[in-house]
Image (cartoon, grey):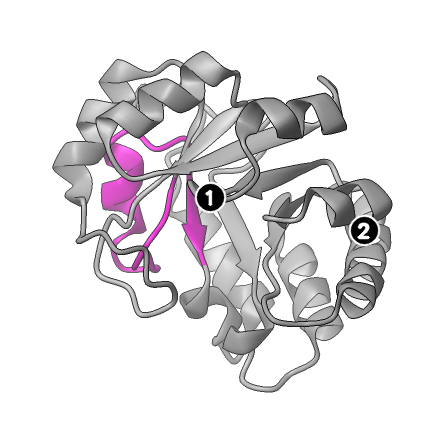
Amino acid sequence: MSNALGFHPGPLLPSPLYAILDPSQTKGRPLSSILRELLNGGIRIIQLRVKEVATNELFTLGREARQLTRTAGCLMIVNDRVDIALAAQADGVHLGQEDLPLDVARKLLGREKIIGISTHDLAQARQAERGGADYIGFGPIFGTSTKDTGYGPRGPAMLREIHKAVKIPIVAIGGINEKNITQVWQAGADAAAIISDLLGAEDVAGKVRRILSLYPPQP
């Protein structure tokens, strides 16, 4: 059922807030404690994004995150690494434009796993939908220092174009925070991904609750 803004999260995106767990943004706090705070606040979909660590360390992190998210009823997506997603029994994987091709990832993961694809323009969004992606990430919506995508800010106006052009769910990303997230939902995003504004908060659980409270109620 859609809400007052005309879009609706569903089983693939059970919440309008999509958290990205990146240890480089936790101000030195343990990843597991931040994850527990996110879950306590009400996060129901999370992406584990850990760069430049050994595969065995990433697997250990993934396995621990899987245990915590499963207990909380939260979907867990692994960034880039199909092997870790499989080994840790994650719910799916999120792939960038330069990662493993979508069709190859689908063969490895099967239909039951979720595959999200990062997109930055209309052509990429349409290609991801045609290729069988379950959802797309689109951005950067605003300027961001968390990740250098090589693309300038796309803005809410371009997000509206993407919303009109594709039927699969859209996760907006890039420079989104508590102050501007409503603009992103209003532009048609089914969920908005936040990294630094969540992970850097003193009270992570409280931050999650405040952001979720901004989402228009279901009719």
Task: Give percent across and percent down for residue 98.
Answer: 45, 44
Task: Give percent across and percent down for residue 213.
Answer: 44, 48
Q: Residue at x 73, y 64 (%)?
A: 36
According to the picture, the residue beneath numbered tag 2 turns out to be 66
Hey, which residue is sitting farthest left in the picture? 157
Q: Residue at x 33, y 16 (%)?
A: 166
Left or right of residue 217: residue 155: left
According to the picture, the residue beneath numbered tag 1 turns out to be 96
Few, some or many residues within 10 Å of mark 1 (<14, 14–19, 20+): some
**Relative depth, front residue between 102 and 47:** 102
- Name the quarter where the C terminus is drawn: top left
**Relative depth, front residue between 92 and 39:** 92
The amino acid type found where label 2 is placed reads Arg
Task: Give percent across and percent down for residue 153.
Answer: 18, 52
Few, some or many residues within 10 Å of mark 2 (<14, 14–19, 20+): many
The amino acid type found where label 1 is placed reads Gly
The magenta segment: 172-194
Whether residue 23 is visible to the viewer of this picture, yes or no, is yes
Task: Give percent across and percent down for residue 218.
Answer: 45, 25
Q: Nearer the viewer, mark 1 or mark 2?
A: 1
